[in-house]
Image (spheres, rainbow, N blue to C red):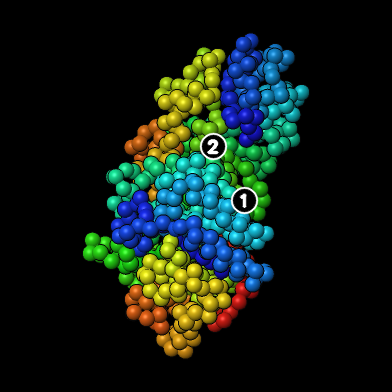
Amino acid sequence: MMHVNDYTLNVPLPLAVARGQAATTDGHALHLRVEDTGALVKANDAIPWQRVWEITGPTIEDFALLTAYHDRARWNLWWKRFDVGRLLDLAPSLRRRTVTVLVAPDDPDLHEKLLLGDSLSLRMAVPLTDPDSQNLEELNRVISYVLITGATRPVHMDPVSSMVATAMGHQDLTLWDFADENVHRNLFVDDAGQVSLSARHLTTHPYGPLGELNLEDMERGTSYQRLSSYAQELFVSRSECATCRAYPLCGGWLRYVDRGYDCEVWHLVLTALLEAVGATERTRKLTRHR
Amino acid sequence: MVIILKMTTACNGTCVYCSAYKEKPQHLSVEVARRVLGLAAEYLRADRRGHVNLILHGGEPLILSRRFYATFDKLMDEQLGALRPRLNVAMQSNLTLLTPAKAAALGPVLTRPIGTSYDLYPEVRSIRGNRSLDERWYRAMHVAREANIDTGVVYVVHRKAVRDTEKVWTFFRNHPDISSVRFNPLYAEGRGKCDEVADLIITAEQWGEFLIRGWRMYELDGFRPSFAPFSEFFAAHIRREPRRMSCAHKGRCHDTHLGIDPDGSIYNCGRWSDTQELCYGTVFDLGIEEIEQSPVRRKLGERQKVLSEGPCKDCQWWAYCHGGCPNDAYLEHGTVDAPTRWCAGTLAFFEQCLRPLGDPIGRGSRDR
């Protein structure tokens, strides 16, 4: 993710273009949430494009109508209607590194869509919003798919592909990052202009209104401090998370909101991934030096 | 050449097994510091390609003032001059006294990381006044990061850690502030000889158990963590690079190491300084040549011959161990001419973990 300053501001389109708000978002990369594609076109002149990094919301069908905007940002596009013929038509424009096709975790055609999208070399993702947002059985199947298929050709299915990259030591991102909840990087703004870490933290960890956003004050505030000292706290208190095998991927994210959250199945899924990657790396190192 | 310089014997820590504990604390004087740096310069002049690795040790070296380190910095210039780039300076500390001001004073002195001790069990390590070591340690780690001072952890393996090997391993592997760890077995020296510590002291078999279970974790993690001695045995056995092993396993410490007390007494390393045995003399009496010719050094050097022709004659793992640390042997057997007290456990580890990956490298092997 690109960071113009410290934070990426996940903000609804109307707020991004509203007079008076732009000043407070200066210096930050904007991640626009677009409900209505028409509104994006209408607001074109008012959008600070030089700071727009990512746009989430349009469907893959909408994207076909936004040709003039394709190169202006990274796009997260919803694939809702399971129409194979239409997907084949759209595939050439979707097959670019700046486009990720999103499939809802509760989509009845989730598995088929992921496999079909991957077979067309599209970057696929199932958005991660909270610990219960993923179908863990499906996630486990995707992990096997990514590990096996990924050994012969590039496969991009998030959050699994990002997890694999972390497990292989290519990055140190965790579920906090995959859910856009990295306290040092992400800010979420709701429709009313209230700033928080993410949508689910609006009431529990409010940072204040966007118009009055002052990063220094925000970083000194209780909500921010609680979030940013969380990892250290896990180790100081010798919590279960500190000695959990899944920690390199989880980072304590699963239990942040609810310390008693039963993460057993998540734990199995994540440790299976870590062990698979560890076994591959082990074999590679032993083979290389023999 | 590695010089372990005891900057002080005083410490703000109350680690129950401290091997360096002394009743009467003593600090390094400017005169001794000057002479030690002079010895380093003498060594560097004699060996044109060599380096000296100076490890500022204790006690707790951060007890010394910022002014002392400023003076030490000047002494380095005074004694080494153009040779200074060939002097590497590291530190071993509990880190709890590291403040931004002290980090700034250390900046010009240190060229290598600070090795910091840490434990999962607060009842084992603490600081005076019942204050939280953790809180201070984390604050200090932050200070070190801000000052661009690298850190690594030294972990003393006691009985609780053996019981919880997987937990200890995973804790350090997960820890966001820790990138390298050296696991050393707890041995009975200093406070470690007290009855209260008896429950923590480990046997050779328990050390072997820790190594075997730790190696399983190392395998699970794809041989990735930089956790010694596992990474060193991996380098020796898999990559055929035995030179990466630590002083305890190379069998060359009689050539490569020196330990110097705050009063200037010279020993073969910091551990001998803790034991207060086999003293060479003092920095005021001896030059590098006399140190190299010292009867103590010769006696330690002969150990390799004695062991390789005696008790370790038929051992296939000689190249990975060389009889282990002579100080360990001395503490166990009262003589250096015996294998390390960890022999049985280490052998079990070699056979169970390394043997299935290939036969050991031969005696006298060098890096591939």
Residue type beneath disc 1: Gly
Chain of the residue under label 1: A
Which residue sits furthest bottom? B309
Q: Secondary structure at mark 1?
A: loop
Q: Position of residue B159 (x, y in %)?
A: 31, 62
Q: Position of residue B103 (x, y in %)?
A: 51, 45
| Figure quadrant of residue A9 | top right
**Which residue position holds label 1?**
A150
Q: Position of residue B98 (x, y in %)?
A: 45, 45
Residue placed most toward the observer, A275 or B59: B59
Q: Is residue B192 left or right of residue B281?
A: left
Quadrant of the frame with the C terminus of chain B? bottom right
Which residue sits furthest left? B195
Which of the two discs, 1 and 2, sits closer to the camera?
2
Residue found at x 50% / y 40%:
B100
Residue type beneath disc 2: Phe
| Figure quadrant of residue A57 | top right
**Which residue position holds label 2?**
A178
Whether labels 1 and 2 belong to a single chain: the reply is yes
Q: Secondary structure at mark 2?
A: helix
Which residue sits furthest top? A19
Residue placed most toward the observer, A231 or A277: A231
Number of numbered labels in the structure image: 2
Residue found at x 57% / y 81%:
B364
Q: Is residue A2 visible?
A: yes
Would you call the spot at circle 2 few (<14 residues within 10 Å), some (14-19), or many (20 or more)?
some
Which residue sits furthest right? A68
Residue found at x 73% / y 14%:
A45
Residue found at x 54% / y 48%:
B70
Residue B295: mark in rendering? none
Q: What distance separates the C-alpha of mark 1 from that of mark 2? A: 19 Å
